[in-house]
Amino acid sequence: MKPAEKTALKRLLAQPQQIVIVTHWSPDGDAIGSSLGLWHYLRKKGHKVNVITPNDYPEFLHWMPGHKQVTDAQRDPGRAARLIARATLVFCLDFNDLKRINVLGKLVGESPAPKVLIDHHPQPDAFARFSLHEVKASSTAELVYEFMSLMGDQKLLDKHIANCLYVGIMTDTGSFRFPATTARTHAVVQHLMEAGAENSLNHNRIYDDNSESRIRLLGFALSEKLVVLPEFRTAFFALSHDEHERFHFQKGDTEGLVNYGLTMRGIVFAAFFAERDGIIKCSFRSKGKFDVNAFARENFSGGGHVNAAGGASQLSLNETVSKFRKLLPDYLAALNKA
């Protein structure tokens, strides 16, 4: 954040504001952790604050302090619109393009309130007046911690904020194993734990609270739906709507499935195609230098990070898989260099 931006934003936050925090469609651990961490912090500074999500998020995140105060715009669009209309400041977390917040994008874009972007995705659109943007950051939650430091408010860090930010960092770093995990990340986590973040308990809350149906769905996907293409150093899964229904799918049940493809020796590119909500949702992961952000942008109307991205397809599931397989020869050189 530029010094002039920092000064102007500190001046704004020195007075009570009506603040809205928005995050991306299908929020994950970093989206919710960073949003609720910021919510607790701004409330401690005396602001009226509301978190709005474009739609619901997985049940394994519902334990987080502040969850019950989150407004789901899909369930209550009227309330979401009213809150944005009244806002004097809008924080945009964990997304870099207003299209990523679905119908909220138009409302936020038309709001006269200044926008504050806190994000780590590459190639952000220029819609925010204030920006704390760092592609090399492990997570948006880490950047919320840095934002508190920039505002001179580390002293306000408490157990609720620490747990929320810890979950955001933990989930977006794959439990601290992804390359974006830096020495600075661990230094931030140390401070969060000193402030009361419950590292072991948070891990259990996120990763060890599975339903039987979710475990059976994962087992089915791994045993019956895994396709390995060693000639392209690629593996993928594809699940139909009926297959989701067969295992009583709930939001979050396939979280992390795509990563299993990368656990195999020799595989550098993994994909997951899910038929849900009338479209095919695509998840892409990679190792090394293979850029799935570019792959998703070029072929599946998506984007994200170099090693983790998403997209969508309006084709049928079979047609989407066929398109994906036909694209692989064009990327063979890049896959071999990863």
Image (cartoon, grey):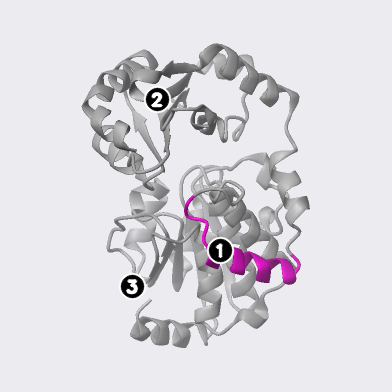
Residue ID at (34%, 67%)? 128
Judge by depth and name the residue closer to the eye, 74 or 36.
36
Q: CA distance from mark 1 to mark 3?
A: 27 Å
Identity, as a three-letter code, of the amino acid under mark 2: Thr
Q: Secondary structure at mark 3?
A: loop
Q: Earlier in the sequence, mark 2 or mark 3?
A: 3
- Judging by the rendered image, the residue that carries numbered circle 1 is 185
- Judging by the rendered image, the residue that carries numbered circle 2 is 234
Residue 142 vs residue 278: left or right?
right
Tell us which disc is closer to us: 2 or 3.
2
Q: Position of residue 112 (x, y in %)?
A: 35, 70
Can residue 59 be seen from the camera position used here? yes
Q: Earlier in the sequence, mark 1 or mark 3?
A: 3
Identity, as a three-letter code, of the amino acid under mark 1: Thr
Q: Quadrant of residue 257?
A: top right
Identity, as a three-letter code, of the amino acid under mark 3: Arg
Q: Is residue 195 magenta?
A: yes
Q: Is residue 189 magenta?
A: yes
User: How many numbered marks have been drawn onto this rendered protein structure?
Assistant: 3
Is 42 placed above or below 168 here? below
Can residue 301 be seen from the camera position used here? no
- Judging by the rendered image, the residue that carries numbered circle 3 is 129
Q: Secondary structure at mark 2?
A: strand
Judge by depth and name the residue closer to the eye, 199 or 68.
199
Q: Secondary structure at mark 1?
A: helix
Q: Residues within 10 Å of mark 1 (few under 14, many from 20)?
A: some
Q: Residues within 10 Å of mark 3 (few under 14, many from 20)?
A: few
Magenta highlight range:
179-196
Is 127 placed above or below 101 here? below
Residue 235 vs residue 199: left or right?
left
